[in-house]
Structure formats: structure tokens, C-alpha cells
Image (spheres, helix red, strand yellow):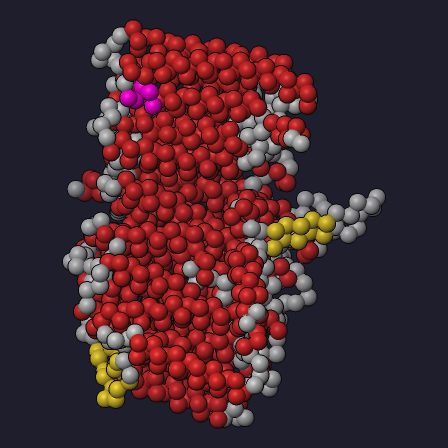
Amino acid sequence: MKNQLYFLIIIMVVSNFYLLSSSRLRALIRIAAVQGIFLGLFPFITQASHFSQHTLIIGIGAMALKGIAIPLLLFRALRGVEEYREEKPYIGYTMSICIGIVIVSCAFWVGSHIAASAFFPFPALISLAMSLAAVGFFLIVARKKALTQVIGYLVLENAIYCFGISLSVEQSLLVEMGVLLDLLVGVFIMGVVIYHINREFDSINTESLEELKE
Amino acid sequence: MIFLIAGILIFVLCGISALVFTSKPIACKLLGAGGTMAGSLAGLFVAFRVLISGIPLYWHASWQMPFGSVSLSIDALSAFFLIPLFILSFLGALYASEYLDHDAAARNLGLHWLFYNFLVASMALVLTSSSGLLFIMAWEMMSLASFFLVLYKHDDKGSREAAWIYLIATHIGAAFLLAFFIIAASQTGSFDFDSFAKHSFPPAVSGLLFALGLVGFGSKAGFVPFHVWLPKAHPAAPSHVSALMSGVMIKMGIYGIMRSLVLFGPFQEWWGLVLVSIGCVSGILGVLLALGQHDLKRLLAFSSVENIGIISLCMGAGILGACNNNPLIETLGFFAALLHVVNHAFFKGLLFLGAGAVLHAAHTTQIDKLGGLIKKMPFTAFAFLIGSVAICGLPVLNGFVSEFMLYMAGFFGLQSQASSMFLIAAVFMTSLALIGGLATACFTKAFGSIFLGEPRSQQTAHHDVGLCMRIPMYALASLCAIIGLFSWLVVPMLCGPLSLIASSNQSGIPITLATLSPWLKGISLGCALFIAVILLLILLRKRLLKNRVVSSSPTWDCGFSAGTPRIQYTGSSFTQPVTNFFRKLSFSKQTLKVDSSIFPQNWTFESDVPDAALDKVYLPGFKLIGFVLSKLKWLQGGKVHVYVLYIVLTLIAFLTWNFLWAK
Amino acid sequence: MGKMMLLQYLSPVLALVCAPFLLGIINRTKAVFAGRKGQPLLQTYFDIAKLLRKGAVYSTTTSWLFRAGPIVSLAAVVVACFIIPIGKCGAPISFTGDIVLFMYLLGIARFFVVLAALDTGSPFEGMGASREVFFSVLAEPVFLLCILALAHTHDLRFFSILGGMSPYAIVPALLAGISLFVVMLAENARIPIDDPTTHLELTMIHEVMVLDHGGPDFALITYGSALKLWLFGLVVVRAILPFHPASMLLDCSITLCTMAVCAVIVGIVESVTARLRLLRVPQLLIGAAALAALALFAGEGGLFL
């Protein structure tokens, strides 16, 4: 069981690096979808010993929402705007991977300290959550396109999900459901906003929003 | 001991008499160079005897100084640092006897020899003094002597500026050292090193002392925020002086840190962390800045910063190993540090002497103006090649051995249980590999664009340098090769200094030579095989080409036969991809001026890697200080009686303080 | 005991004899993909033999260093063959830390090839040398990280990391293997980093550095690059092979077969991918570094567990 968990964590971290290094918006959505699906597998592994309906709901729900529904929505938003690439991010892709290596290592280091300070059934998940959060924040800060920023939020949400399942499934169900719902609404709104930004400025660069200030 | 004192006396006397005989060039040269060489031989004898026998020597003067005694001692650590000092001063003097010849009419060589001898004498005193006060005095003398040596071309504005920056930098460091010794002495009541060693300092005080020492000694050694004087002073000084300064004088800073480790132990973990981080930063930034330089001696100066960084990494690893009760890491770290001190003295000395030879023959060290010197200066070129291979840490030569030990220290750090050690070790080994790759880029650039290809300008050499300049280069080159090939014989000599350093930590004496020597023998075996295969291949090639047509023609030009030497890749273009990739770290500047007319003629492109620390930190800082101080200008009215009043007022203030509070 | 001593020499002998064969396999794979019949599998041997029989032409700009370049770099790679073991047979030169020696031997080989290129004074060769140095600055730390990921639970010697490892380490080994594969492509001038068969000097990296070498010198260089490919292939293959049978013969032959497969994979990669823009290569290498760092941290004793 530990082996499978471990394997999943590696996949998640590799996908993080992919998110940092890719400039293609469609690829980013696809990777976010893959991340969502693999994330949905986590509860099945952590709760393998006392499997319940909650586990099923939380796992399948995450897969359906993060792996299928949200990516489809984002693809739709993208179809409307006809933009395919993040051309000039604030921080270049090579630099992003370098920073990624640093923040992921730091996240795992901090995570291992947190996990050592109290009892956690799955300490590695804490580290993973930290690294997901770091990468999510980084994406939001370092990229210009609204869509990439939405993906950053998605990764951030994945981090919260990870924290949740690393504690215990039953307690976190409510929180998780709430967050998922928030996220879905958020993505809906963002899709509308992207559409409007694009109609107004002919691009989905968030820096054009600066023109709105007085 | 008597030999060392005799040696120091010889330095002083010969230096002074060289000044007296300034008007007679031959006598001046004989006295100056001969004095250095004789004194160095005497000193070398003592140093080797102490290092091999392991018995420290002491000498106390019968007269007293305020706050302490005049006492010298040579223990293993001093002896270890004395060896490169005397070897380089000896070879430097021999080299200078030819190098300075063409300056005999224009410059005052007597002064030069005076300060050269004084520099060597003061460094010997720094290494052997066992009292804080004497140490500070010798330290100051060393700084002043080297200041005057940097000022050799005193009619050149750049030289004066360089010497000025050096003087300021070294005195800021000295101020920290003064505080360092005063705090230590206030704890023990005496400036003598013995009393420091016997006293057990509370951790807070020894931490403070370490921090002060790090700044004070670090500004001499050239750790990254304090390195600004190096790239200025080295190009200005004559080459043998640069060799001595870069090879040995900056190591006085390392010696100071090691000595304070001996005196103020036990170590604390954050010392190691600080040294490792300084080492990583100095190493990477030093080599990146070196890579972008256009002047050979400036390049070598930055590369000294890199190597000091590597030594700092080694010491940091040693301290971390000691604090984590891992004697293997401790041994490897300090072994690597000590060995790299000697190695760097040899190959950097060699490279500076080579740069001097280039300057001597071609009258410039601008890399992009040179080229093709290997044909006119084959001996210098071969020696410089050996130095370049050694400084890149490539096998067969000595640089590899110390880097190997550092890699091993890092590797055992990875294997230790603590997760912070794991992270540190991973970071530092990656940095080390990066530094290695960048150093290769840097020195292929230096060697390739100076010695290979065709001359890029009119400034080129017509003949090689003479025997007196060749012998020192080849002596250093063979020392590099000996350490590289016979490392398992050399490394046991490091045990003496190591056990001194380790003893202050009370973690026992972690000599693990038995573990180490099979590795070193493995390296030697590999190197021997490498040389054998090279010889075999040379024979094979000779046989193959024996009865065949071997012709010569121009270089393949892809059908475009109008090429001139100007279309060659220059050193700057060679390193452009690397400097461009790392531009955010090294603050390199590239400016392209575009001529947008229909027939563009005047495109210009400039690339430069300025020293960001100097331009962005120090100069604005000093400007600010100057601005603040200019408000106090009224104090300095130019009236002598007012100055006397100041003195009286100060005296009264001190007296009052003494009466009221000092009880 | 005597038998063991002899067996140690199996690895260098196999490397020295079979290395050019790998290039043949790669070229044949590419030919099959392109629908051609392709050159004979032993073509590299024929090339080397032909070159060895020729005379030499040297540029008037060059010096002795140009002639020394191929010799020193080949010698370094040959010694590297004596360090790396094939399976459990061991290698003649084996000590803790031999990996560092291996890395630096390849470094000295590169150092001299680059200097020989600069010795010609040709702008093309300067360009190639500049790129080679740049990419190796990035590739070297990646290689070290991969090796550390494989070695840090064992011992910093090839014999212990390429001999076989605990099953738990399969994931880091896989990551490190992928990363090593990228390093192998970069160090051996293969597509997508460099194209050995392109027709334009301006776009090459490794091949343009050796433009001026001919005759026996070029034979040494060709042989040297074949050996280098073999060495990297061996490291990649042994890193990712999940099982190591006890029988030495079986182990050895499995390794050899996997190396042939590895060569086929290289050929496939070359056939199906386009060459990267030069500006993109650092990104690929840094990506490989990320994988290698992950492999290091994910291993036992790392930060994950």
C-alpha cells in the first residue's frame, strides 16, 4: 500500500514540474485533469483498510469534478478565446523549473518537519500538499494568462484536498465538499470572466486589466 | 626555530639593503631576489621539519609588550601554511628577477624588493605569532606591504584606484579583527593564544568571535560580499606579486579562520552552515564573474574567489561533520580544505606567472586581443595548460584530489540520517558539479583564446620568456602533477594540522587514513593507466602516419575563403551562451547598438560582467557615508591649535570615563 | 580468485570491442523508420578501419594541441571503460568514489576536444565548442544528481550501484534512468539535442567541433564517441534493469541485450522527434535535473519517507 501511495506522490510531483515547464494552455489543462484523476485515487489507498461510502464519494467526486468536469469547462473557455500559448510569462520556463526544484525540495523538507512534530498517518501526504500549494501559488504569481491562473487555483485546491485526506477522510468530507463546490462556482465565474476579458481586450492576459485602474 | 628567525631577519635586512642599492640594478636584484630566496629556503627547512616530526617549536622574546608577550610558535597548522608561502615566494623572486628587468630604468626596483621581502616576512610572522597583538601587527604590516606592491605602477590612475580600494577593504577587515582580539582578550585577560586555547568560551561569545573573525578574515580571503578588492588589485600588481597575493596572502584569511577554530572550539553547527552557504555563493558567483571577464588577470582574480569558496565549502563540511559526530565527513572536509589551500597556491601561482609571461611577451592581457601564442611561446603555453587543467579539478593533477575528497564528504553527508544534512549535501554537491563545469568553460576560454588559433590583433608575442621565468612555472606545474599522481603519499602530511583542528572540538582525533588511502590509490591507478594509454596512442599514431602523406592546408572554411583572423570566435563569444543563461545571477550586461539605416555599417555590441557587489553595494554605501561625513567637515578647520584642543578634550573624556565608570 | 581477476577485464574488453556496434544499431533503426535498407550494422568498424589507413591533413593554424586532442580524449574514455563494471563481474579499477573519477575523466576528454576545436581558429568550430561547453555545464550536475540518487543508499562506486539494488528503489531508479537517458542524448550529441547528420555546420554541436580532424585522428574521435555512448548506455541500462540474476553469464547477457534495446530506443527517439531549438535545450536539461532531484529526494533516506 505504501508503495502505491509513494508511486502516486511521485506522479503528482512530476506533473507539478510539467505544469511549471509547459507553455501550452491545452497541455496545462490536460495535466491538471491528470492530476485530478490521480488525486481521486488517494483516498482509495489511504482508506483501504476501512473502506466506506465516504471514501467512494470523495474519490469518485474528485475524479469526476477535477479530472473531467472542470477541464471540460476550461477547454470550452479556451475554445471561445482561441489562445493556445502563454508566450511571455513573468518568469521564464527554465527559471520556473529551477525555482520549482527549490520550492518542491523545501516543501518536502518543511513537510517532513511538520509530519515529525505530530502524529499523521500519512506524513508524505503533508509534504505533497505543501509542494502542491507552493507550485499553485507560484503559477498564479508567475503567469499572465487568466487561464493559467485558474490552473494555479486548481493546484492550490488539490493541495487542500491532500491536506484533508492526510488527516482523515470522515472529518474532511464536509470541508472538501464545500471547497469543491466553491471551486466549481469559481471556475464557472472564471470562464465567464475569461470570455469577457477576451472580448474586451482581444487577449486573456491579466496584465491588460491594469488598464482598468484610474 | 632559529632558522625561521634567521630567515625573517634575512628578509628584512636584504629588503632594506636592496633599497639602499637602488641605483645599482644588479646589486639591487641580487640582494632583493637572493634575500627572498635564501630566507625562504631557511624557512622551508623549518616548516618541513615541524610538519614531518610533528613537534611544535616555540620561541619567546625576553622583552615584554603591553598586553602580552612577543612569542612565536610553529605548530603543524602554521608549518602547513608556511610551506606554500615559502615555495611561492622563492619561485616568485626567481621569476621577478627576469620579469622586472625591462622596468629597471623606469621604476624604483629597490622599493619593490623592500616591500616584497617585507610581505614575505610579515606573512611568516602572521603564521607563527602566538600572541594576538603580534598577530595584528604582522597582519597590518602584511596589508601595507602588499598595498605598496599593488601600487607598483604608481603613475597609473587605475593602479592607484585599485590600491586604494584594496587599502580600504583590508582595513575594514582589520577593524573587525581588532574587535575580535579585544573581545577575546577581555574574556581571558591576555592576548596570548595559549590563554585563548585554555579558556573555555561560552557559546555566545565564541559565536560572536566566529562572526567577527569571518568578516575580518573573510575580507582578506575574498568571500563573496567582501571580495571587491581582488579583481582590482590583482591586475594592477606585477604578476609574481599577484601570484603571491592570490596564492598565499588570501590564504592568510583561511589560516585565520582555521586558527580561530582551533582556539575557540568546540564548533557550533551554524558555523558550518554559514561557511557552506558562503562557499556555494562565492564559488558559483566567482566562477560566473570570471567567465565573463575580458582581462586575463581579472579573470584569474575572480577564479580565486571561486576557489576560496570551495575551501570555505570544505571547512563548512568539516564543521558540520564534527557537529554531527561524523568523523569521516569531518576528516574529509578538513583534508579537502587543507589540500585545496596548497593546491590553489600552486596552480593559481602558476597561472598568474603564466599571465605575467603573456603580459611580458605580448604587452597585454586582454583576452580578445590575443591568440595563437602557443606557437611563439610553447613553454609558457604548456605550463599554462597544466595550470588550467589543474584548476578545473580534472584528474591527473592536484585539483582533482581535493575536489574528490569534497565530493566524498558531501556523499557521506547524504547518507547521514539528519534530513537537514541531506538537503545541504545535495545542494552543495550540485553546486560543486556546476562550479566544475563552469570552471571548465572559463579556462577553455582563457587558454583557447589566448594561446590557440590565430592572433586577433597586432599585439602578439615574438618570443618565449627566458629561463628564469620558465623554471618557476615548471616547478609549480610539476608540484601540481606530483600531488595529483601521488596523493596517497601527500595526504598523510595533512594529519598534523587536522588533529590540531579536531582536538579543539573534543570529538577525538578522527584520523581515518586507512579508509582514505585505498581511494587515493585507486585515483593514482586510474591516472597511471590514463598516462599509459596516452603514450600508447601516441606511439600508435606515430606508427600509422610513418609512411603516409601528412600535408597541411588552411582550416576548413566551408567554402568561404576570405576569412581573416577576425572572424574567429573570441573568448567573449565563446562564453556568451553561458553568461547569457546565468545573466540574472551574474548581472552581466549586453548592449547592442543597432544601425537602422539601409546599409547598416556601425553595429556595436558590448558585453561586460561588472562586479555587482562593488557597483551596487559598496560604491553607493560609501557615497552615503561620504555624504554624512561631509556634514562634519567643519571639525577639520585646518587650524593646528584647534586640533590640539581636540586631543586634550579626548584625553579628558577618557580620564573622566576612567574615574567615573571604569571602577 | 584468478578467475575473478580475469572476469574483471570482461567489461573493458566488451566495451572496447562492441561499442561501435551500438551506433550501427541506432543507424539501422533510423533507416528502418525511414523506409530505407540502411548501412551494414558493422559500418562504424569499417569507417574506423578506413580512416586508420589514411594519411592526414593538418591546418596551418593548428599546433601540437590539435594533434593531442583526440589522443587525450580517447585515452580518458578508455580509462573510463576500465572503471565501469558490467554486471557483477566488477571492473579493474574500482574504489569508493570511482564515479567521481569517471565524471572527471569525461570532463578531461571534453576539455581537450574543445581546445582542439579552438586550435583551428575556425568560427564554426568555436561555435560548436561554445555550445558543447554550455550544455555540459548543465548536463554534468544532472548526471551527478542521477548517480547520487542511485548511490546514496549504497556506496559511491559503480560496482555497488550498477550491481543490483533493493526492489523498493525502483521508482527513483526509473526517474533517474529517464533523466540519465536525457543526459546520454545530450552528452553523445543525439537528437533532440544535436543532430550528428545535419548538413549545415552552423547547426551542429559535436560534429562541427571535429570538422578539421581527418585520418587516424578522426578514427580516434569516432571510436571515442562510440565508447562514450556505450558507457552512458551501460549506466542507463543498469540503472533501470529491475532484476539481476545470480548467474554472472546470464546477468551479463541480459545487460547486453538491454543495451541493444536501448540503442533501438535511441534510434526511435531520433526518428520520431525533431531537433530542439538550441534555446530550448537548457530547458530540457533542467527538466532532467528536476527529475533527478526528485529521484534523489524520493529515495530511501531522502525527504519523502
Q: Quadrant of residue B491?
A: bottom left
Return the x and y of residue B253 as percentages of the image width and height.
Answer: 37, 66
Q: Residue at horizontal 47%, vertical 34%?
A: A97
> Which residue is farthest top?
A53
Judge left or right: residue B605 versus residue C72. right
Q: Residue at horizontal 55%, vertical 15%?
A: A189
Q: Residue at horizontal 49%, vertical 25%?
A: A152
Return the x and y of residue B540 as percentages of the image width and height.
Answer: 44, 52
User: Is A61 inside the magenta-drawn segment?
Assistant: no
Image quarter of the N terminus of chain C: top left
Q: Which of B279/B382 is in front?
A: B279
Please provide the residue range marked out in magenta: A163-167
Tell me: residue B185, above or below residue A200.
below
Return the x and y of residue B287 as percentages of the image width and height.
Answer: 48, 54
Tell me: residue B630, above or below residue B29.
above
**Main secondary structure of the magenta stretch:** helix
User: Is A166 inside the magenta-drawn segment?
Assistant: yes
